[in-house]
């Protein structure tokens, strides 16, 4: 018969030698192995880390940036209807672009010009001249090569640029808001922000103006 365990070897809340002793022997043996053959323990961890970390070079190509695919139902009826519109009502961004015919928001760049002061208006003569300079800077870049075209020229999505003209220092032209500009054909609700109107609904001041520039999607 085996000898009964000494009280010092029994596990209890005040005696943990039954756990400590085997762990001590285990780490003692491991230390002897490491001391006898140190190179595998020095080389394997860096090599293993480098091998597993090499997969990160493929991460940029595997990232999913398609917001529609991530946040909309797969095979939803809206997507089927959009595909139907694309199939039977195709667009031609190179020759006959029309923003109203786009089945999506389209490819575009948008700039928002804001008046420098809270009580200033972007429609004032000096501020509007800077807006026109900003528009010229955009068109002087590669926009003419990339823009959606209609009738041989870049399609204009900013009718306010034609409506608002200052001739010989004239005052602000009458602009009904939100609709009614250009003989009632132009909607200004998406072009002007922070608008204040008079009693007849005509624009007195606007804090910001939005400029849109559509780009070709069909190459």
Image (tube, rainbow, N blue to C red):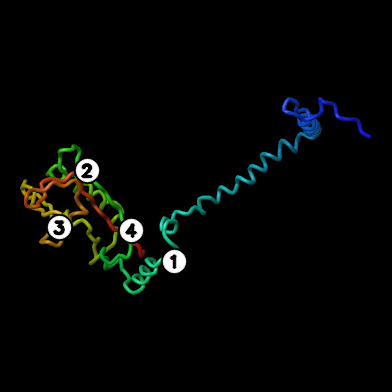
The residue tagged with tag 3: helix, strand or loop? Answer: strand
Which quarter of the figure has residue 162?
A: bottom left
Whether pointer 3 and pointer 2 mark residues with C-beta atoms closer than 8 Å, the reply is no
The residue tagged with tag 1: helix, strand or loop? Answer: loop
The residue tagged with tag 4: helix, strand or loop? Answer: strand
Which quarter of the figure has residue 205?
A: top left
Q: Earlier in the sequence, mark 1 or mark 2?
A: 1
196 to the left or right of 96: left
Q: Earlier in the sequence, mark 4 or mark 1?
A: 1
Q: CA distance from mark 3 to mark 2?
A: 21 Å
Q: Residue at x 26, y 68 (%)?
A: 96
The answer to whether residue 101 of the structure is visible from this angle is: yes
Q: CA distance from mark 1 to mark 2?
A: 41 Å
Which residue occupies the foreground of this view, 138 or 85?
85
Q: Residue 78: x and y, percent?
A: 37, 66
Q: Residue 82: x and y, percent?
A: 36, 68
Disc 1 target residue: 75
Residue 179: give its label.
3
Residue 107: give its label.
4
Q: CA distance from mark 1 to mark 3?
A: 37 Å
The answer to whether residue 27 of the structure is visible from this angle is: no
Q: Earlier in the sequence, mark 1 or mark 3?
A: 1
Which residue occupies the foreground of this view, 180 or 25?
25
Name the front one of labels 1 and 2.
Answer: 1
19 to the left or right of 61: right
Residue 114: give its label.
2
Whether pointer 2 and pointer 4 mark residues with C-beta atoms closer than 8 Å, the reply is no
The residue tagged with tag 2: helix, strand or loop? Answer: strand
Q: CA distance from mark 2 to mark 4?
A: 23 Å
Name the front one of labels 4 and 1.
Answer: 1
Q: CA distance from mark 3 to mark 4?
A: 25 Å
Q: Earlier in the sequence, mark 3 or mark 2?
A: 2
């Amino acid at each position: 018969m085996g000898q009964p365990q000494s009280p010092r070897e029994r596990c209890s809340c005040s005696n943990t030698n039954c756990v400590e002793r085997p762990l001590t022997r285990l780490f003692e043996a491991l230390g002897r192995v490491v001391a006898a053959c140190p190179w595998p323990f020095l080389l394997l961890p860096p090599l293993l880390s480098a091998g597993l970390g090499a997969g990160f070079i493929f991460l940029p190509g595997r990232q999913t940036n398609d917001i529609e695919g991530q946040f909309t139902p797969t095979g939803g009826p809206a997507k089927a209807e959009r595909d139907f519109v694309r199939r039977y009502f195709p667009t031609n961004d190179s020759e006959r672009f029309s923003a109203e015919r786009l089945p999506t928001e389209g490819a575009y760049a948008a700039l928002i010009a804001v008046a420098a002061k809270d009580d200033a208006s972007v429609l004032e003569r000096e501020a509007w001249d800077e807006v026109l300079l900003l528009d010229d800077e955009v068109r002087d870049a590669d926009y003419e090569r990339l823009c959606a075209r209609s009738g041989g020229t870049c399609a204009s999505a900013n009718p306010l640029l034609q409506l608002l003209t200052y001739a010989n220092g004239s005052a602000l032209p009458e602009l009904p808001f939100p609709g009614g500009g250009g003989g009632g054909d132009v909607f200004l609700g998406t072009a002007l922000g922070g608008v204040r109107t008079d009693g007849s609904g005509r624009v007195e001041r606007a804090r910001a103006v939005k400029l849109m520039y559509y780009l070709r999607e069909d190459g």
